[in-house]
Amino acid sequence: MPVDKAVVFLQNHDTQHQCGISYRDGSVFRVANVWMLAQPYGYPSVLSSYAFDCPAGNSMGPPSDANGNTNAVTCAASLETATIGQWVCEHRDPMIAGMVRFRRVVAGTDINHWWDNGANAIAFSRGAKGFVAISRESATVTATVATGMPPGTYCDILTGGLIGGGQPAPAPLSS
């Protein structure tokens, strides 16, 4: 599919109600969104939904009052604290929202400086505008990788911390 014609997503209303990947998967769901939003391919769609019991409640409609009117949106404090019948608001999760900002900043750039450890850790740049490191390893991964970024101090948009930049830039990769 041509990049300008593709819509990419992890879940939509149909797949979520088939009990596929969702907010219930916590950090795995966040990492999957980081990956999707870090890619230059397609137009990403992040579903914002409500909590329901899966599979028993997968035909449940949105949070509603006794008359069937959809309730005003009041979001759970986090993906992990969403309770059945409450709005989850995945788009407001700090990591997902941070990656939406990242995608806007790196728009128009390609993937460069690919690195992986041959297992569960990867890193790559988006031109000279951004850098992504993802790890699902059980222990901290430490590596020296070329970032393609000019020397400097950068903000880790997922945690709010600061990272020394430049090329090459040693940085621990964490899940």
Image (cartoon, grey):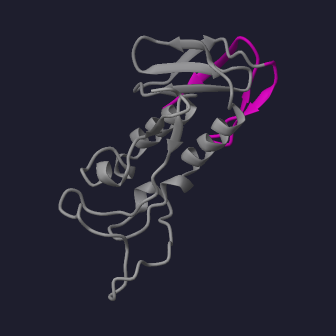
Whole-percent x and y of residue 59? Answer: 23, 64
Viewer-closest of 105 and 76: 105
Against 166, residue 159 (above or below) is below
- In percent of the image, x 56 and y 56: which residue is there? 92
Question: Does the stretch in magenta take in 166?
Answer: yes
Q: Is residue 156 left or right of residue 26?
A: right
Question: Does the stretch in magenta take in 29?
Answer: no
Viewer-closest of 165 and 50: 50
Residue found farthest to the bottom? 67
Whole-percent x and y of residue 5? Answer: 51, 34
Quadrant position of residue 158: top right
- In percent of the image, x 41 and y 21: which residue is there? 120
- In percent of the image, x 33 and y 44: which residue is there? 21
Q: Is residue 121 left or right of residue 105?
A: left
Magenta span covers which residues? 150-175
Against 98, residue 114 (above or below) is above
Whole-percent x and y of residue 154? Answer: 75, 31
Quadrant position of residue 142: top right
Q: In which quarter of the image is the N terminus?
A: top left
Quadrant position of residue 102: top right
Viewer-closest of 53 and 1: 1
- Please count the marks in the image: 0
Whole-percent x and y of residue 99? Answer: 60, 40
- In percent of the image, x 26 and y 68: which residue is there? 60
